[in-house]
Amino acid sequence: MKYIGVPTPIDDALMKVTGHALYGDDLAFPNALVGRILFSPYAHANILSIDTSAAEALPGVHAVVSYKDSPQTLYNRIHRNLHDTPPATERVFDTRLRCISDAVAAVAADNEVIANRAISLIRVEYEELPFVLDSELALGENAPKLYPEGNLLEPLLTQCGDVDTAIKSADVVYTQRMETKMIHHAPIEPHVCVAYWAPDDNLTVWGPQQGVHRTQIILSRIFGLPISKVHYHSPLMGGAFGGKDGLTAEHIAALLSKKSGRHVKIRFNRKEDILCTTTRHAAKMTATIAALRDGTITAIDYRQFMNVGAYCGGSVNVLHAMCGKMFKVYAIPNMRFDGKAVYTNTPVGGAMRGFGSPKVFTAIEVAVNQLAKRLDIDPVELRMKNLMVPFAPDPVNGSSLANGRVRDCLRQGAELFEWDKKKQECKAKSGERYAYGVGLAAAMHGNGVAPFAPDISVASIAMNEDGTCLLRTGNCDHGAGTYTLYKMIVAEQLDMPLGDINLIHSDTDAGTYDTGAGASRNTWTGGETIVLVARKMRERLFSLAAEVFGVQAEEITLENGVFVTKDGKSINKTELVWYAMDKRREKLIETLSYNSYYNAGSYGVHFAQVRVDKATGTVRVLDYVAACDVGTALNPLLLEGQVEGAIAMGIGMALFEEIELDEKGRGKSTSFRRYRIAHAADMPKIRIHFVEAYEEHGPYGGKSIGEASIVPVAPAIINAVNDALGTELSDLPLLPKKILAALQK
Amino acid sequence: MLPIEPDEYLSETLRAAGMLSVRRGCDTGMCGLCTVLVDGTPILSCSTLSARTDGHTVHTLEGMQEEASEFTKYLTEQGAEQCGFCAPGFILTVLAMKRELQTPTEEAIRRYLNGNLCRCTGYMGQMRTVRRYMGLPEPEVD
Amino acid sequence: MFSFQDYAAPATVEEALALLDKSRKNRILGGTAWLRMSNLKLHTGIDLKNLGLNSIYEQDGALQIGACCTLRQAETDPLLCGYCGGLVADGIFNIVGVQFRAVAQVGASVFARYGFSDLLPSLLACGASVRLAKAGMMPLEDFLNRPFFRDILLEILLPAQNGIGRSACLRNSAGDFALLNGAVYLDHADCRIAVGARPQCAALARNAGEFVLQNRGSLPVDVLAERAVLLASEELKFGSNMRGSEDYRREMCNVLMRRMLRPLLGKEEGH
């Protein structure tokens, strides 16, 4: 193939490296105002009264809004579509504040200085309410209730086989308790949006958004507008990782715009981005694994309390998604997922890279290594004995697990990492000061939202009069290179350079419909849609060429961008476009709506070598191998970039990332000083290996990588630390103080 | 001359003047996105008063296109660009590093670039690019 | 949000002092990186940039660091890099990034007495003094022990000495603030041990330093170091914050001190 499989830089790299690429913060509008939000100072409170008169009187202030101006529609900040009805308990402004990310009031002013001053002039009388921050405690009988019906959002019990009997009759049983903390997506571009409520009641929003259509729907619901009057444009995005999915401040900007009649821009500072968007959920988990002496794992029993925060958001979906994944990695007859999603008065949990998978697999994979130790079996061998085989049936619903190549990842990854050799070396190298260890983890993530919901992408290709083309998609590129891939696919199908393809994206007016850029849909569903629509255009061009030359389409070939007959006659795309215009009076355009009915797994096995300073408890990841089941490596260059970025994020998750709250539920992690993400100096040597085994239903046999590649990182590192120290560390993140405490036990 | 408030910070002044490559990422001087060169030295424009730079030469990426072109070509080829939001600050820091350090070690490079945060790439593509630009070999594991 | 109404860059120290004394709402600006994160609302921000305080120079073996030198200037200055084995310069590079250090100023870092400062332990270990516009010269240690007072820090003075020093710090991740830092200076007549980010402002462990000085040569290095570590742990106060608890800091202080002291006393750390 000419384009697919060829390492290809991101399509707009030139704009990015020259600094000319425009992001949400760069969009300028005439007479635009700056919006700022007053957030709740309490984890749980009622607003008794609010006085905004001083703020309103401040020169340069054009609108102040609070619950007094707020529509009373209840909504959920994220849905998949209009008929998706997750619990709706949020209002734009409410008198009841359930966490510190709740908005109390907002102002729009000529500039940020005036807006901040106005915020400080708002006087609010609060009634503090009892609060709860822990998901397990929140289910206690006397726990403060966020909602009259209680704090349990969703219980989920799914199982196969007979777990209890299997555990009773096992030779070895190991139970792993684990806690993971709230984590910040930390896209390097903080959240930003601009809203304009026009006099004719058309509401337009500009801002980085993973799901323009689904968020358009929520806005239409909140404000009682027909969908046709809500317009959403997502510009270039400075990273998202799940954090720019659904409503953040767009509804507040809209309300301020409605009141002021002006464009209103709200840009979060980093404190707000950490505490007032969404987070990766905190969870308390228990994974019990049972095995026979020979290393046959007979049961996995997984229980968890997942901290939803104050509002549902996407949490029900996260719970169901992680449950589904758990059954897809090991061929074990008896498995049980018993999870509870629980409301507490913390910031809201939402979608984040991996969508629940990192939690479930961190607990299980750390437990598997502890089990291996107790069985005295090498953890690579133990996994090899128990991992799923391609096309095995899902033990819960019987559907095919497709061409999941986790065993190949394990075998080939172990070889590249030199697992056996490294394992011995670590033992030999460990001394008075440093302990060395190796660890690995196997895991997976899905592709799309099928079969649970419509998984629709729409695309269109229109040929321009000079033979170049315009591609329309509804998908949104987080910054990972989705659009580059789409252009590569069109280039491959129509045999034209990437530069000849213009792209319109993530825009409810000018783009096409899309379910949204989440659930690892961009390559899997979006990519396949592009393949299909480009193939349609390809066939159209072939049949036109055949018509021109009076031959069958099969007798024509496409060579170097030109259609050629067997006897050497040729016609290029420009000529075909004009043939259609002149002779047939047609504009060449093809549109296609595609739904993905299939959901393959993207598997991965990661290997880490660490060095732990035994006196200080500091961990350095030294060497890392990621073996990734990608179907087809569609764009190896950006695939590698995805995996490397995931490893950095996973190192943070394993070792230092945590949104800390104080005892009253207020945020302590208020900046990049207090919320640490990986720096260049934290990174190990990394080698990435792609296992390529064609995945049917994916574009050119390819499948997702971005989410799948973060799932095994934290458990691989934790396992390496435990290997180095002989510990059973499981409380994330593994800060030096925790490691030291474990060593002193 | 640009009109400024007495307590205005340089990043705001530059953005208001249309230098949009100066990005805002953390508001606390921790991310390096707003890096510009003042008399050739990389500084955080979010933490520098505009008034203080009176009489000094300020370069943003907009004004460094030619000097940056070799490095940015490598960046692109290495796939080191993803979302691109951190690119301008990072590029300016690397250009200053090249002028400042003649034959740096791997460690010296990591130290120099430690103030530029990136969430997409894990810094790996960036480091490969920097090594190529500085003429350094790939490092071994400790 | 930090703000002020007037910006002034006086041409003399006297003018700067007069402005400072005029109102409690007038302040010296320093590097403005930290001030920016405060909520101070000032009348006049006083910039010392025209006072010629931005160089590092040598006089009879002693070094003088102007208050307006940036941290970046200090860490790259050849004089400072050669002073006491690079003790002062080495303590700095861990602070955030080069861009930040090119903004933050030495004088402001000292005057503000930031607990997390990676500079203060090294300066204390060197036996630095400070020169203030009103209060004149005083040892840095005395300055740090005095309650805050309104004055202008002009220079930091490092004495002429030929010993060697070492600094160390502990961080939860690269680029984060230190959860503990320290520095040791040693020559034939002095041993100064300073520990900072406890999380309180850096302080000298005088008893430990004195003990090393009295007993070096007579006690084996391991014993000497261990006893010194114990003494420091007794005489220094530690506290808790989000980066670490009091107990953890005390324990880490022992580790850092061992790692600084033993090589200085002639014994390399094992692996």
Image: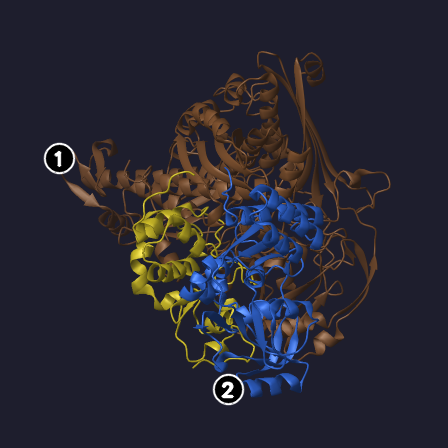
- Chain letter of disc 2 in the image: C
Q: Nearer the viewer, residue C59 or C3?
A: C59
| Residue A484 position in % (x across, y down) | 38, 46
Image side of residue B41 versus residue A518, left or right: left
Q: Which residue is mark 2?
A: C11
User: The chain drawn yellow is chain what?
Assistant: B
What is the spatial separation of the Cα atoms under label 2 and label 1, in whole angstroms? 87 Å
Residue B36 % position (x, y)? 43, 66
Q: Is residue A82 visible?
A: no
Relative to A599, say whether A635 is above or below.
Answer: below
Q: Quadrant of the C terminus of chain A?
A: top right
Front one among A548 and A621: A621
- In the picture of the structure, the residue carrying the numbered disc 1 is A567
Q: Is residue A516 left or right of residue A635?
A: right
Point out the image quarter for the N terminus of chain A.
top left
- Say which amino acid is labelled 2: Ala
Taking the view exactly as shown, the residue that stands out farthest to the left is A567
Residue count near mark 1 (Cα–Cα under 10 Å), binned few <14, some 14–19, many ≥20 = few
The label nearer to you, 2 versus 1, is 2
Question: Color of chain C here?
Answer: blue
Judging depth in this view, the residue of C20 and C130 nearest the camera is C130
